[in-house]
Image (cartoon, grey):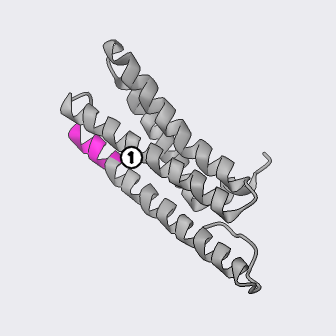
Amino acid sequence: MVEFEFEKLVVYQEARALRKRVYKLARLLPAHEYKLKVQMRDAARSLTNNLAEGHGRYTFKERIRYCRDSRGSLQEIVDDINICHDEEYAKAEHLETLRVDAAQVLKLINGYITYLKRQGTARKKGSRSEPLTPA
């Protein structure tokens, strides 16, 4: 299988794993929570879509903007997990594990944003820096 550069990013790999788990949770929701199911899938898909699309952008500033959008989608996912907890749609332990995973993805996104900012600053100053590598 052909691998794209963004797929090598640890942040993308972890976000993708979280997306898969959120999809599984969405499948467990009762039929009357159709809108919540759709919202959860949309936010999870946006999490990884924005990381992938941002990686394909030309400037560091654009890449950072997409990472921030991804971070916003992650926050939506956490709120949806809270709804599932409040309504007791899944075991509390399972939902807590998802929250822990979401916190890890948040750390990775923030770290990637910091990395991109440094790379952008280094290029502005005219210094020769390493090419953009996976974080």
Residue 61: x and y in percent read 64, 62
Image quadrant where residue 84 sits: top left
Position of the N terminus by quadrant: top right
Q: Is residue 131 left or right of residue 72?
A: right
Taking 92 as reference, is 24 above or below it?
A: above
Taking 5 as reference, is 69 above or below it?
A: above
Location of mark 1 (residue):
75
Comparing 62 with 23, the one in front is 62
- 95 falls in the magenta region: yes
The three-letter amino acid code for the residue at tag 1 is Gln
Highlighted range, magenta: 91-98
Residue 102: x and y in percent read 39, 51
Position of the C terminus by quadrant: bottom right
Residue 79: x and y in percent read 32, 40
Comparing 122 with 92, the one in front is 122
Secondary structure of the residue carrying numbered label 1: helix
- 54 falls in the magenta region: no
Q: Is residue 135 left or right of residue 55?
A: left
Q: Is residue 22 left or right of residue 118?
A: left
Image quadrant where residue 57 sits: bottom right
Q: What residue do we see at 40% from left, 28% from top?
A: 26
Residue 72: x and y in percent read 45, 47
Magenta stretch mostly in which secondary structure? helix
- Residue 36 visible to the viewer: yes
Comparing 38 with 122, the one in front is 122
